[in-house]
Every structure is written in C-alpha cells, then in structure tokens.
Image (cartoon, helix red, strand yellow):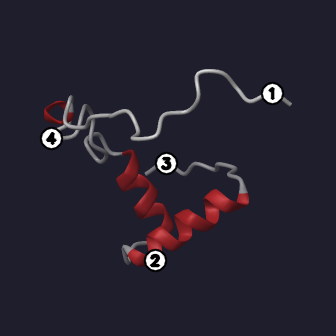
Amino acid sequence: MAQVTIYLPDPIAKRLRAASRKAKKSLSAYVADLLQPGARPSGWPVGFFELAGSTSIEAPDDPPPAEPPAL
C-alpha cells in the first residue's frame, strides 16, 4: 500500500479527524474510503427535478411605492 503525505488547512484537518473518530476509523482509512469511487453520490438527488415549480412567489399585500421617497 502506498503512503501519501498531504498538507491541509487546520480547520479541514480538524473536521477530518472528528469525522474519522465519529466513524470509528483511523484517519487513513476514513480518507481512503472518501476517495473510493462511489463513496460520494454523483448526479442529482432523487426527487430533485420533481421540486421544479413546487414553490410560488406572490406579490406582497402591501407592495413598495412606485417611486423611492424624496430625501
């Protein structure tokens, strides 16, 4: 197995360490799992396109004035 050294900003390294502890894996095993093909979803989430048009924006009951107030 190859050994690789990478340099990460401290906040990212801290998040990776915390995530690996939560997953009960070594940091190396956790990062290797993230890099496996298929480890992260690709494409659009299920149901994404069904959301199109599911919201509406209506004019407020009290629209703003046509002209800005004079200063």
Residue name at image x 68 percent, y 52 percent = 8
From this view, report whether residue 31 is shown above or below residue 69.
below
> Which callout, 2 or 4, points at the residue further toward the start of the chain?
2
Q: In front of the other: label 3 or label 2?
A: 2
Judge depth for marks 1 and 2 and give the one in front.
1
Quarter location, residue 46 = top left
**Is residue 4 toward the left or the right of residue 55 in the image?**
right
Q: First in sequence: mark 1 or mark 2?
A: 2
Gap in Å between the C-alphas at discs 1 and 2? 60 Å
**Residue 3 locus on image (x, y percent):** 54, 51
Amino acid under label 1?
Answer: Ala
**What residue is at 55 percent from the left and 33 percent from the top?**
64
Q: Which residue is mark 1?
A: 70
Q: Is residue 14 above or below residue 2?
A: below
Around disc 3, counting alpha carbons within 10 Å, would you say few (fewer than 14), some (14 to 19), or many (20 or more)?
few
What residue would you read off at disc 4?
Answer: 46
Q: Which mark is residue 42?
A: none
Q: Nearer the viewer, residue 46 or 66?
A: 66
Name the kind of residue labelled 2 in the image: Arg
| Residue 21 badge | 2
Callout 3, which amino acid? Ala
